[in-house]
Image: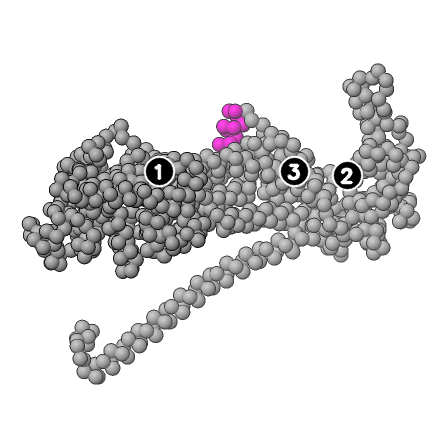
Amino acid sequence: MENDVMRASLASAEAAQNNHTPELKMSARDVRVFYGESEALHGVDLDIYANEVLAFIGPSGCGKSTFLRCLNRMNDTIDGCRVTGRIELDGEDIYDRRLDVVLLRARVGMVFQKPNPFPKSIYENIAYGPRLHGLAESRAELDEIVQRSLTRAGLWDEVKDRLDQPGTGLSGGQQQRLCIARAIAVSPEVILMDEPCSALDPIATAKVEQLITELSESYTIVIVTHNMQQAARISKRTAFFHLGNLVEVDETTKIFTTPSDSRTEDYITGRFG
Amino acid sequence: MDIQQAQPNPPAAASDKRRVRVEKSLQRRHRAERRFRFIGMSAVVFGLGMVALLFISILAKGLPAFWQATVVTEVYFDPEIIRVDPRPVAQPGESPAQLREREMAWQTQVTMVNWNRILEDSLIAHLPEAASARPRVRQLVTSGERFKLRDMVVENPGLIGQRAQLKLLADANVDVWLKGNIDRSLPDAQQQLPPEVRAWADQLYERGVIQMRFSTTLFVNPDSRGSLASAGLAGAFVGSLYMMLIVILLAVPVGVASAVYLEEFAPRNRFTDLIEVNINNLAAVPSIIFGLLGAAVFINWFGMPLSAPIVGGLVLSLMTLPTVIIATRSTLKAIPPSIRQAALGIGASKVQTILHHVLPLALPGILTGAIIGVAQAIGETAPLLLIGMSAFVAAIPGTPFDQSTALPVQIYLWQGNELRNFFEARTSAAIIVLLALMLSLNAFAIWLRKRFEKRW
């Protein structure tokens, strides 16, 4: 387990050295989303690089969550929702009919706005995914995955004595970290987070933010947030959405200091949104 | 004007005026609230009062029927009267069929014995003055009890020549007379029993020969017309049980499966909308229509037996199906989408999401809906009348294909019985049994819900 972490951090250190040629993880070209007849997203082109934290910001209803849900095809579960365009994960079209959506979601995990642990024990919450995909061959291996996931989510010390108690009995912040642990238990490559801190208090938020920074060493993280300070604190790049358009995407520091579009500037300086 | 008063720093007089107005409107609002609460409370009290009245009247009428006038007496199996051959035993070289034939002949001989005379002798031992009125003294004991004596001898021929202390059911009219369910001051012509029999009944009751004993008859016997006092519920109860079983085995799985399909898998289009509307309509169809359907399809078309619990069960299943589907669908709708998203988000397939997460959470609601549907089904009478289950059946059905009646139908039949004085109480007793069955089913539903309820 220690080795894995070491190897992962070594890999990310290498990635940091070769910073000028980041590895492309996902790419979207002319992605449009329709709810029934109305178009909610008007052709988004976006690249996501390995091991970066990419933040989506923008006013409510601008399509940032809709786009996020395209990346692991969660939109498929919504009645009347239609996606066109092309999204690739490691060069593979994820909307290809031959692609198994179950496998895609194992590779692109998701953390939701409201903590949503299963009404089962803490252990079962984590073990469900690995068991589903047959990742553990023995009980001991499964135990190890559970411990490793909880440790990475910074929750192990808080819950190690009560793994058999319901996950719903934890505090809101703990529940959200449990959900993050559940997502990383299936070893995804990309983690999508849909406003993961909007239901949490400032202290719990700080813990989750720290966790996101740590996780970015080994995972690619895309996070939707309403909180611009949060985007500034944790993300490497930021994408600004407005009325279903991707207005601009750039290094976070650049977006917050010298945005190239006036709408971005208006939003960041609080003129609307 | 209000707007003017709401301006910053209003003059002191204006602010006073405003407070008075608010206070006045407050009083009005409080009065309205009290009135509303009072109306609600009175509605609840009225409803509870009516239910209490119903229960009190049923219990007051029905509970006495659980105790029945019983003659406790010594019976002498007089060999002078019981002149029968010894019970046949297997002869060497005899086939089982031959032995059975001789056995049947022997039983016929036993049945032909003048059992009434033995009963009369037993009663005359208590009432020497009745010796001259043998046919009348027999009216004290219900007519079916002579078969009890026969059965005892068939079972154990060694009883002949012995004495045995027996509990014999008194005649229904004796029970009515002793319980005061008939006006004692009525003239003889309007009484069911001759004057001397009434006097004997009183005498024996005083001496403790006739006692009010707990009536097991009610629970172990099927219905009876010849021997009214021994009419019981067992046939109807077993019939209802078979139907309940069929409903549980048919309506619940089919209903839950259709609900899961419609709610979770079916695409939303014109066709599924049509199905949904029709299911809702089906729930509103009067139950007697389902009986007609059963008579037309199951009996006329498929040639299933008349009066059989299998047909009743099928008809009730059809009737219960929409209830189960609607209850299950609304439970599934109430499962928070976050649980589905959580499961889908870590790569569970749709079926896995439903089987592992949605159904376990929906289980208490589904069970409650199913049990309420089943309880509704076993209380149903109208459709059963149309498939012949209102026939008089004097046997306990051995299989769902045998003729049978059902508890609510039994209530209906007893309610119409000619000997009202006796069957009024019997009817209420049957209602108590049916209500007890329903209440225990509902209690079971509540227990299940509490047992499986999980929070999320």
B186 or A18, nearer to the observer: A18
Q: How many marks?
A: 3
In the rendered structure, the residue with mark 1 lies on which chain? B
Numbered disc 2: what chain? B
- Horizontal arrangement in the rendering, residue B114 relative to residue B4 (left or right): right
Q: Identify the chain of the residue marked 3, using the numbered disc in the image.
A: B
Farthest residue in the top direction? B93
Residue occupied by mark 2: B144
Rounded to the nearest angstrom, the CA distance separating label 3 from label 2 is: 17 Å
Which span is picked out in magenta?
Answer: B290-302
Q: Which residue is mark 1?
A: B348
Colour style of the rendered protein structure: one colour
Q: What quarter of the picture does the C terminus of chain A occupy?
A: bottom left
Q: Secondary structure at mark 2?
A: loop
Toward which corner of the image does residue A185 lie, by quadrant? top left
**Residue at (20, 52) in percent of width and height:** A234
Earlier along the polypeptide chain: callout 3 or callout 2?
A: 2
Prevalent SS, magenta region: helix
**Which residue corresponds to the image point at 59% horizontal and 43% vertical from the top-left?**
B408
Mark 3 neighbour density, 10 Å: few (under 14) some (14–19) many (20 or more)? many
Q: Secondary structure at mark 3?
A: helix
Task: Looking at the image, tell me whether mark 2 or mark 1 is earlier in sequence order.
Answer: 2
